[in-house]
Every structure is written in C-alpha cells, then in structure tokens.
Image (cartoon, grey):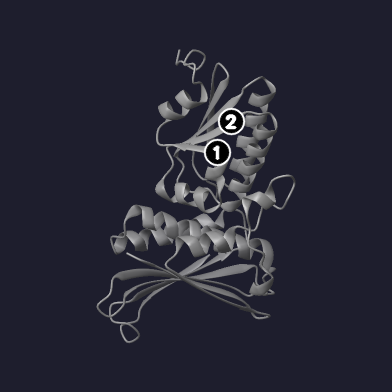
Amino acid sequence: MSEACKITVERRGDVAIFWTDGYINNQGGEEIARQAYTQLDSGARALVLDLGKTRIVNSIGISILIEVLEKVMDRKGTLAFCSLTPTIDKTFRIMGLAQYAAIYLTLEEAVKAAAPSGESAQQP
Amino acid sequence: MSRRETARPGLDAGMREVALTIPVAPDMEIVATAQAMALGEYIEMPRDKIDEVKLAIVEACINAFEHAQTRDERVHLTFRVGREADGPEYLEVEVFDQGRGFDQRTVELPSLEKTFGGGKKRGWGLQIIRSLMDSVAITSGDWGTRILMRKYK
C-alpha cells in the first residue's frame, strides 16, 4: 500500500519550482528536501512549491518542510507555497508556517514574487 | 484488515456505522481516509471538510503507530454518520488503540518558534486534529487511547 508523492522540478534562473503530486508523508517530504538541497547547492535562491496536486500533507511531511525552510532562511533565500487546498492552507497557518514562508494562490504570483526583476524566472 | 458495517437505528435514528481495523504499517492511515471519503460523500459533506476529516484521521493514526506501542499491532477505527436532533448531519470517527496511553497534561503545545534552531519539529498531531475537527474528545490510560472526533456537514 503506497501512494508515493511524485515530484517534478524546474529551474528558472535563481528560482526552483517544485510540483508535487500525491500524499506528502515522511518519504515525500524527504524527497522534496533532497531535491531542494540539490537546488540550493547549485545556486537557487528561491524555492517555490506548487502543491496543487497534493491533498494531504501530514505533520511528518510538514516537519520536513520546516527543516527545508530553516535551511533556506540560513542561506538568506526564500520559500513560497502556492495552489494549496483550503485544508493544507489552514494547516500551514495553524502551524505558523505562513509567518515564515509566503503563500500564494497561483504559481504565477509565487514565481513573480520570487523573481521581482522578472528577468531570470521567465518561462522559456 | 477487516471491516464490518452495521445499521443501528435504535441508537440514533438514521445513524450508520462502519468499523475498520488496520495494521500498524506504513501508509495504512491512507486506507482509513478512504472510508472517511466514502462516508463523507454519502452525506454530501463538502470536499474541503472531508479533507479536514481525512487529515485528522491521518494524524490520529500516526500518533497511534508511532507512540502507542499497541499490544495487538492494530488500530481500530469506527466511522459513524448521523444527525443530531434538528441539527446538521455529521461524520464521527473514533480511533482506538490498545497501547500504553499517555497523560494529556504532559503534552507540550508545539510552536514553530520552538522548532527553529534545532528544536523538536514533531508533536503537531493533536493540535492539528483539534483545529480541524468540530469536536474532539480524548481519553487515555494504560488500556490504550481513544480519540473521538466529529465534523458537521
């Protein structure tokens, strides 16, 4: 019994965009973290997580996302979420994540905020 | 995994109950959420509210899996749909484990401020459950733990 979370990553300049599809539990969270650290190590300054195809993020998954957030903040970068279901949005706000990571309705808004110059994160 | 369904018209007119037992094993909490989804749709509960019930179930099951040290390596769930007199329909979920129990007074309230800088990042389960459900009752002792939670349509 497994509902593995699929993760797709695209780099647009300094911005790394992650699309998740499925349940974010410990395995899903760890895979996001692994790929996030790879992107940070290769120079990404902003991470945008589009959770539009994820309906459940459990507290273990969220705790791993908090670790990613800590690492991003240590490097003076930014982490943003977008396309959240109302339940995930509510859960992130209950936990106070919204104080440290921006939450946007759409990917376009999140990417625009992550790359305000509008140059480096344009879609090819 | 086992499941039984019973109608209990004598207990609460129109109430239906489904019982489900899941093993303590990875991702079994998702099996339980499927039952909540089916019953939520049965009473035409909005999808967002069903998602809240599903996450509360996930957190209750994870707590049992990780902390309870259940004697039978099982978590027992009972799902009920019903309606209070002149009130809205509801979906009620009881999550029961025959574990070691815990003292609710010793559960520290989590906060993100405490987690930064190497602090404990876990321990959000009960807080999430209480925030997402309309009513939550937790009883625990050396016989195990029972979490009874209800969401109105």
Using the rendered image of the protein, determine whether residue A24 is visible from the camera's viewpoint. Answer: no
Which residue is painted at 42% across and 61% down in the image?
Answer: B35
Q: Chain of mark 2?
A: A
In the figure, A2 relative to B135: above or below?
above
Disc number placed over residue B61 in the picture, else none: none
Task: Provide the secondary structure element on which disc 2 rests.
Answer: strand
Side (left or right) of B74 relative to B89:
right
Q: Horizontal and vertical percent for residue A93?
A: 50, 49
Q: Quadrant of residue B75?
A: bottom right
CB under 8 Å between discs 1 and 2 = yes
**Image coords of residue A51 (percent x, y):** 47, 38
Q: Would residue A70 be seen by someone viewing this image from the given angle?
A: yes
**Residue B24 x/y as whole percent:** 62, 62
**Secondary-structure class at tag 1:** loop
Instruction: Judge whether B92 appears above or below B122 on screen.
Output: below
Q: Residue at x 68, y 52 (%)?
A: B114
Q: Which residue appears farthest toward the left when viewing the image?
A: B86
Which residue is at a point 37% across and 53% down the rendered structure image? Answer: B48
Which one is nearer the viewer's eye here, A8 or A18? Answer: A18
Q: Residue sitting at 45 percent across and 16 percent down? A: A123
Q: Amino acid at mark 2?
A: Thr
Amino acid carrying mark 1 in the image: Ala
Taking the image as shown, residue B43 lies to the left or right of residue A9, namely: left
User: In the picture, residue A107 is in which quadrant?
Assistant: top left
Distance, label 1 to label 2, CA atoms, is 7 Å
Question: Circle 1 sits on which residue?
Answer: A101
The quarter of the image holding the C terminus of chain A is top left
Crowd band around label 2 with a 10 angstrom C-alpha radius: few (<14), some (14–19), many (20+) = many
10 Å crowding of disc 1: few (<14), some (14-19), many (20+): some
Q: Which residue is mark 2?
A: A78
